[in-house]
Amino acid sequence: MGDRRSWRWVRSALTVAFVAAVVGGVALALRGQQWSTLGRLLRPETIPWLLGALLVTSVGLLCGTRAWMLTLAAVGAPVPAGAGIRMFFVGFLGKFVPGRLWGLLAQIRLGEKAGVSRARMAGTYLVNLVVVLLTGGTVGLLVAPAVLGSGLAWLAVPVTLLTVLAGWPRVIDTLVDLAARLTRRPRPATLDRPADVRRSIAYQSLSWLLSGVHLWIVAVLLGADARAALPVAVGAFALATTAGTLALFVPDGAGVREVTMVAALATVLPLPAAVTAAIASRVLTTLAEVLTAAVALVAVAVRERTARATAAPDRRAAATAAHRTGRHPAEPDARLTPTPG
């Protein structure tokens, strides 16, 4: 009993430490922003649009959650929705902690609790990383017509790449093998559920497209032409976030993401407005990510607690019946058990 109580205290302390580290990482990611420039956006008539941008970013994040869970199923480790949501968002919040290692370790621990081995969790991390980088880089090519010229011909490149990935998901296997070698991690098992890989690619691509809409809304509020800004904003967000993901030792790619985003947005906005848009994007996405994660984790906890409370009376009734009859609840009634002959 004492060991169980001690472990409970340790687990609570680790949870508090992780939350504190995430809060510190969020503060670090938002530190040094030019907050005064956001006054151009915060006006009464823009509030509904900014709330819409916040909402669409949250929906995009939920699509990314679904993509991750499909990746987990593709490596042969499907889990219940509640466990998968908790595993995803705990690992996701870990991106705010420098090094990204702590979120992965917490995710692996939750995976073991759900019956998923460390090897499969590490394999899921690699496969998901490849899917995220490939789809993010592909959607990021939407900025090419504005940055490199040559009109709409560049748009054929992302369409072709996504078609190849969806048509031949085994390409992911080859890239995961390469990623395992570069990161010196064990190579995960071959993906044996191509349908789940295709769906993961589709959901992750949709996640990039929806999440990028918030930057388009901000750019239009700052004076960009709506039609010209749409592919640039969506592509800029995907490209900048992908670049930030590769910056492992910076909380949430702070700085790296903004520089990439400003360079792309400068094709449709004056430079000061592009800087304002990048700062607004950082604030909006951070708010959306933290709020969505908090709501999702609380919802899972409430659902599980409700399920336990509902099941408790049934367990008590079974225990009472067993006490009265002198039998274990799972023990069959001898009167109802057929005998040979």
Image: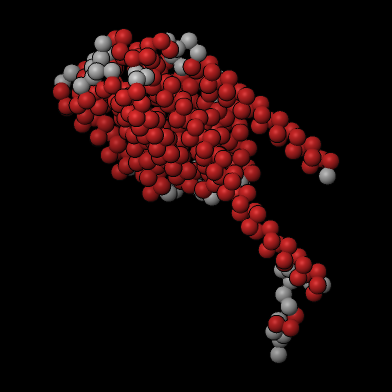
Residue 87, picture quadrant:
top right
Q: Residue at x 79, y 36 (%)?
A: 6
Does the rendering let one see residue 200?
A: yes
For the point 38% across and 49% down, the residue is 195
Q: In the image as oriented, which residue stretches furthest toward the front?
A: 44
**Residue 54 in the figure: left or right of residue 234:** right
Q: x%, y% of residue 22?
A: 57, 25
Across and down, in percent, residue 147 comes to 23, 17
- Quarter of the image with the N terminus is top right
Residue at left offset 40%, top offset 37%: 59
| Residue drawn at (36%, 44%) of the image | 198
Task: Give the residue furthest to the bottom.
Answer: 341
Q: Position of residue 248 (x, y in %)?
A: 50, 20
- Relative placement, left or right, of 77 versus 318 is left
Can you see residue 185? no
Quadrant (top left/top right/bottom left/bottom right) for the C terminus: bottom right
Q: Position of residue 288 (x, y in %)?
A: 45, 30
When the figure is inspected, residue 21 is found, relative to residue 259, above or below; the finding is below
